[in-house]
Amino acid sequence: MDKVKVRINRYDNLRGFAIFLIVFGHFNVMNTLDPFFSKLMLLTGLPLFFFVSGYFSKIGPDEPIKSFRRLLIPYILFIILANVFGFILHGDPIIEKDMFVSNLSIFWFLIVLFFMKMMLPIFDKFRYPLLVSIICALLIGFININYAILGITRFVAYFPVFLLGFYYNDYKDKLQADYTKYVGLFKKYNKIIVILAVIFVLGVAYFIFSTIPFLFKVSYGDKLLTGVIKRILILIAEFTVVLLFNRFMTNRQCILTKWGINSMAVYILHYFVYLYINPVLKAFPEHEIKYLPLVLILTFAATFILSRDIFTVCVNKFTDFFYNLLVKAEDV
C-alpha cells in the first residue's frame, strides 16, 4: 500500500509537543516530577512521536535507502560523536563497547524507527497488521531476552502505535463507512467518552506502579497473567492518548509546528545539550517540585533553539556527506 501523505499542521504540532516532552524527560533525569507524572509522560511523548512517524511513513522502492540515509547513518554517527563529546566534557569512555545497546544510547529511537520502516512492507501484507503487531507485543514478554540490544523490545512495544498512525486514515474511513451507527453514537456522547478515556489513562498511570512496564523492558517472569494484563492496558492507554491528542490538537500553525517539522534535529542535538548541563541537572534533589520551572525553561530554550532550520540543514548535510561516501552516485 503506497500512500501519498500531505503535510498537515496538526501532525507537526503533535510531533512538536512530543519532542518537547521527550527533551523534558531527558533533562528531568532526577525525577523532578512525581513518578505518576513520569508515567503519564511515557504514555504521551513517545507514543505520539511514533504515531506521527507512522502517519508520515510510506511504502515504496526508495523508502529503505531513505531510512538508511536519515535514520541508520545518523544513529551510528551521533553515537560516536556523543561519546567523544562526553569524554571531552566529563572523561567518559570515548566509545561504549555496547554502542548498539539501546539503553546506553539516547538515540535508540532512530534504530527502532529504522526497523519499523523496514518491517512496514511486510506487515502491510497481513490482513490485520495492527492486530498482528499487538499479538507480537504481548508474546515477546514470554521471552527472556536482553531488551536493550538494538531496541528489540521497544520496537515491538511501539510498533502498534506506529501502525495505528500509518493506517489511521484507512481505519477512520472504514469506521465511518461500515459503522455509521456507532460513529453517530460516539459523536452524540463525545464528551462523556472523552472524560471516561481520560480517567482510564490516569488510572493506568496511577495503578501500574513502576515505570518499567511502560517501556516493555523486562519479560513477564513468573507473573504471566499480571504482565499480559499490564501490557494490554498500556497499549490501550497509548492508543487512547494518541487518538485524544489527534482529536483536540489544533491544525493552526503555532510554535509547536516548527518544533515538529525540525523534530529530528532537536532529538539528535538535544543530547549534546544534556551532556553539557548534566552536572547541573544531577544536582537537583529527587522529586523537588521547586526545580520544575528551571527544568521547563531549559527544555523550552533547547527545543526552541534546536528547532531552527539551520540545525536541520547542518544535520542533514553532515549525514549526507557520509552517505555519499558509501553509496554510489547513481543511487543518490
Image: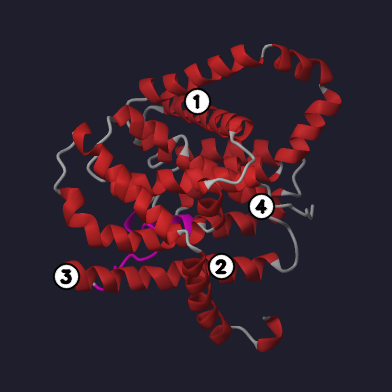
Of marks 4 and 1, the one in the foreground: 4
**Which residue occupies the foreground of this view, 286 or 209?**
286
Residue 309 to residue 31: above or below = below
Amino acid beneath label 2: Arg
Q: Position of residue 232 (x, y in %)?
A: 52, 28
Amino acid beneath label 1: Leu
Q: CA distance from mark 3 to mark 2?
A: 30 Å
Q: Which residue is mark 3?
A: 91
Q: Which residue is mark 4?
A: 56
Q: CA distance from mark 3 to mark 1?
A: 42 Å
Of marks 3 and 4, the one in the foreground: 4
The residue located at (34%, 60%) in the rendering is 271
Which numbered disc covers residue 233?
A: 1
On the question of residue 315 being in view, the answer is yes
Give the mark, 3 or 4, whose residue is nearer the N terminus. 4
Q: CA distance from mark 4 to mark 1?
A: 26 Å
What's drawn in magenta, residue-wise?
94-111
Amino acid beneath label 4: Phe
The residue located at (54%, 51%) in the rendering is 260
Are the two marked residues, 3 and 4, in contact with CB atoms closer than 8 angstroms?
Answer: no
Q: Position of residue 289 (x, y in %)?
A: 22, 32
Q: Which residue is mark 2?
A: 70
Magenta-drawn stretch, dominant element (helix, strand or loop): loop
On the question of residue 221 being in view, the answer is no
Q: CA distance from mark 3 to mark 4?
A: 40 Å
Q: Position of residue 173 (x, y in %)?
A: 80, 34
The image quadrant where one finds the C terminus is: bottom right
Please check the rendered image and state whether residue 97 is part of the magenta-colored stretch, yes or no: yes
Q: Is residue 7 left or right of residue 25?
A: right
Q: Residues within 10 Å of mark 1 (few under 14, many from 20)?
A: some
